[in-house]
Image (cartoon, rainbow, N blue to C red):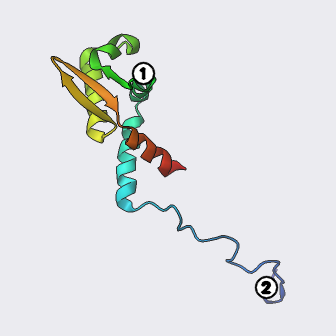
């Protein structure tokens, strides 16, 4: 069966239903950086760690304080903290033999802004 579309009437002009998708667009560099951070946060233990750190009054913990609540070894905790530090999610400060980690609030704000 042949349909002649020349005589069909359209209720709306084709191609004018949506506005352009240019607002809020990430640059390729921003997208790569954000993807790296989200990849790091894709590990459930790291999300738990951030949650524990954020729940503290001063938003910092000594690495040794995370061993018992997470049930992981000190080397495993240190590895995850190092990964989050290298990504820029945490800052660290050595106090004697202990290292204290603190959340970088600007990074979390930036992640939220990228998704809103």
Tell me the quadrant of the picture where the N terminus can be found: bottom right
69 vs 5, left or right, is left
Is residue 116 depicted above or below 78 in this figure?
below
Q: Which residue sits furthest front?
A: 58
User: In which image quadrant can residue 58 be found?
Assistant: top left
Which label sits in the foreground, 2 or 1? 1
Q: Nearer the viewer, residue 40 or 9?
A: 40
Task: Look at 29% across and 21% down and name the residue there.
Answer: 77
25 vs 7, left or right, is left
Task: Look at 39% across and 26% down and name the residue there.
Answer: 59
**Dot 2: within a 10 Å radius of its alpha carbon, few (fewer than 14), some, or many (20 or more) residues?**
few
**Dot 1: within a 10 Å radius of its alpha carbon, few (fewer than 14), some, or many (20 or more) residues?**
few
Q: Which residue is mark 1?
A: 57
Residues at marks 2 and 1 touching, judged by CB atoms closer than 8 Å: no
Element type at mark 1: loop
User: In which image quadrant can residue 108 be found?
Assistant: top left
Q: Which residue is mark 2?
A: 5
Where residue 32 sits in the image (x, y, percent)? 36, 53
Q: Which of the two labelled residues, at mark 2 and mark 1, occupies the earlier sequence position? A: 2
- In 3D space, how far apart are the residues under numbered discs 2 and 1 (Cα atoms)? 68 Å
Where residue 50 sits in the image (x, y, percent)? 40, 28
Element type at mark 2: helix
Where residue 48 sits in the image (x, y, percent)? 43, 24
Q: Nearer the viewer, residue 26 or 76?
A: 26
Task: Look at 43% across and 47% down and name the residue there.
Answer: 110
**Which label belongs to residue 83?**
none
Give the tally of numbered discs: 2
19 vs 112, left or right, is right
């Amino acid at each position: 069966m042949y349909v002649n579309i020349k005589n069909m009437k359209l209720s709306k002009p084709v191609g004018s239903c949506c506005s352009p998708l240019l607002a809020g667009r990430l640059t390729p560099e921003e997208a790569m950086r954000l993807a790296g951070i989200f990849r790091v946060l894709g590990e459930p233990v790291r999300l738990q760690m951030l949650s524990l750190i954020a729940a503290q009054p001063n938003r910092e913990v000594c690495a040794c304080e995370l061993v018992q609540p997470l049930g992981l070894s000190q080397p495993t905790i240190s590895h995850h903290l190092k990964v989050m530090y290298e990504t820029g999610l945490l800052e660290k400060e050595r106090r004697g033999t202990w290292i204290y980690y603190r959340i970088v609030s600007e990074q979390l704000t930036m992640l939220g802004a990228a998704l809103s």
